[in-house]
Amino acid sequence: MATVAVPQLSGYHRPAVLDWIMTVDHKRLGILYLYFTLFFFAVGGILALLVRTQLAVADNSFVGNDAYNQIFTMHASAMLFLFIIPVWAGFGNYLVPLQIGAADMAFPRINALSFWMLPPAGILMFAGFIVDGGAADGGWTAYSPLAQQTGVGMDMWIIAVIVLGMSSTIGAANFLVTMFRMRAPGMTMFRMPIFCWTMLVTALLQLLATPVLAAALVMLFIDRNYGGQFFDPNGGGNVVLWQNVFWFYSHPAVYIMILPGMGIVSEILPVFSRKPLFGYKAFVFATIGIGGLGFSVWAHHMFTTGSVLLPFFGFMTFMIGVPTGVKIFNWLGTLWGGSISFPTPMLFAIGFVSMFLIGGINGTYSAAVPVDFALHDTYFVVAHIHYVLFGGSVFAVFGGLYYWFPKIWGRQLNERLGKLHFVLMFVGFNVAFFPMHMLGLDGMPRRIAVYADSAGWEALNMLSTGGAFLIAVSMIPFLIAVVMAFMRPKDQPDDPWEANTLEWATTSPPPDYNFDSLPPVRSERPLFDARHSGEEQGH
Amino acid sequence: MAAHGTAERQGMTNSMLGFILFLASEVMFFGGLFAAYFIARADAPAWPPPLTPEQIAEGVHLELEVLLPAISTGILVLSSVTMQYAVWQIQKGNQGGMLWGLFISLALGIVFLAAQLYDYTQLHFRADDTIYGTTFYTLTGFHGAHVAGGALFIAVVTVRALGGQFTAENHEAVEASSMYWHFVDVVWIALFTVLYIIK
């Protein structure tokens, strides 16, 4: 082959920092999303430790009541709006175009806009801590009339959440167009990787639910600042209106927060079971079913208001357990009879399935109206949400990080440290959150800063606090593994895990344009087909 | 080598599909505001809701004149027709016809906004009196802001049209702005019906 001298381009090179700020490449934006969201995971985690320290002993005065309200509000706001929801946009940005064999998202510049709306919103929300009256302290649910009575930090919170909502709405439109129209030849909808399907349904939920939250927040802002009467019964308004409009978004939002995690787990389990996902289509339809039913269960957060149709919303909430149960069977069926290995991503994926199962069961348990009446606003609900969002989503985030780290950064995370991380986090998580079930059944209300010694809740709270600090400790091996990985050269092959999907058909990390060539796509496992088509010809 | 991701697909362009999805999110935003209005109305003992004696003494009264908004409605519907005319003209490659359609739509849109602002000055209630005023000003205000946004969109498209940027094959922005304009028109018809007509 004749060699051709490639002319060397010389001239202006943008500094690397500007390269990152001005990038419209989906991979770089995905990485920016991941850095941003993991930063706020740390911030939210520190706030959680403050909460747990305050609650560790009875009659504690570690932080005052006012500070406590701000801390738990901002803990939830950071974790939900600045970590979990955008972290999926991060994984989605990096992976969706690669998994469907596209060169980029449909609208790269709008993609950059979606990301760059996040930092100002995060700063605005947290700047509440330095203004008079402090940060938002009405809970992340911002119920009226409480949310009407708090300081200017609440207004900053409202604007920040509206901006974050805009970011996720336009991001959702971008994901949908990308998946509908940018798929490689042969990549039919029913050959898309499951992670893409979960991002697709998530994007639909974001597109249709987030604007309703924006409407609710606009109303709250008008009530607070311009004398509006939306939520004020004195002027003919209705306090429960807020709950209706807020949960119309925020219940679908819990599926926004979990579905892509389910997608990640469904990518990891087949690879390390050496089997295709059991019941691909059933999984897809279950995901769509969860998305659809997700719009009909919002009032199960409002059973005790006395103004919702209890039989309907109770029944629909039980119904949504059905497609979720289908998925548990998908995962177990995938493992069944597989040739299973246990590298770190697999551990986190199995952690997800087992912990999310508990979160699903204690959630369905609370869907029974009489049970809910007893458990409403107790620590049982706090246990439920953390089994779903930490035992579920956070385990999936780390599973995804360990799994795609070689692809994204071209380096492998240390296996021993990864396993240590998993064990510490798994134990810490259960020690922190399992006792909350008992505290809730014993009647401990959520969101209280101080409880009396005579309540008898101290031992379980102390245990829970210990678990929380163990979770914090579990991050140390993870951080060491990351630092160690970055000290090594990029040595990862295209496909270190012998995986199934197209992102592994290019170099690690991929070039700017993603693919030199694509294998033919004839199933939902094009790389499996490519690996084994050669053997068949040899027979 | 298989080509990736950029394969030509039939039907509408990516931008058009993205725009339609954006409009879907707008529908949900107004859906939230409308829901608040309906709940407030269902809760009220009477509609318009009763006022306190102090409010009556201050001269507040909750009444809406129908005539001017009815004319405004006609103007906005007409502007939707002229906007569609602009789209049809450019589909045939007639740039002049499209420009006339855009100019007239823009002018009618501005007339609608002016009429709504004038209408605001004639009302004897405020946003902070009762839920009646709060919902009225929030709904019409956000709709008005969307009309202003749509007018701005048409203005940008008009400037581009003056520069000869649109042809029979390539006129996505004209179609998008027209779709947006129809959307604000439909929202207004719904608003006019529930705010002014249904007693």
Image (cartoon, coloured by chain):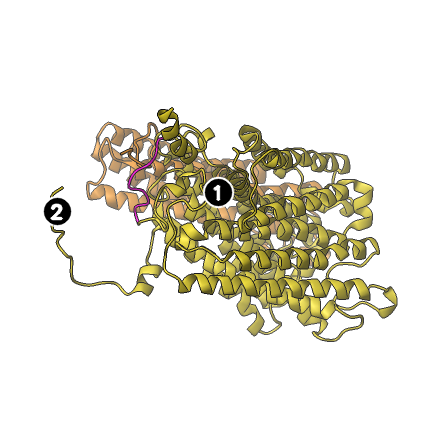
Chain colours: A yellow, B orange
Asked if residue A477 shows in the view, the reply is yes
Q: Nearer the viewer, mark 1 or mark 2?
A: 2
Q: Amino acid at mark 1?
A: Glu
Seen from the viewer's position, the closer of residues B134 and A20 is A20
The residues colored magenta run: A512-520
Q: Which of the 4 quarters of the picture holds residue A446?
A: bottom right
Q: Which of the 4 quarters of the picture holds residue A362?
A: top right
Q: Is residue A177 magenta?
A: no
Residue depicted at 65% across the width and 67% down the height = A49
Q: Position of residue B107 (x, y in %)?
A: 33, 43
- How far apart marks 1 and 2 lie (CA) works out to 56 Å
Main SS of residues in magenta: loop
Badges 1 and 2: C-beta atoms under 8 Å apart? no
Asked if residue B115 shows in the view, the reply is no
Classed neighbour count for the residue bearing mark 2: other residues with Cα under 10 Å, few (<14), some (14–19), many (≥20): few
**Residue A91 tag number:** none
Quarter of the figure that contains the C terminus of chain A: top left
The residue positioned farthest toward the right in the image shown: A454
Q: Amino acid at mark 2?
A: Thr
Residue under label 1, please give it.
B26
Q: Is residue A513 magenta?
A: yes
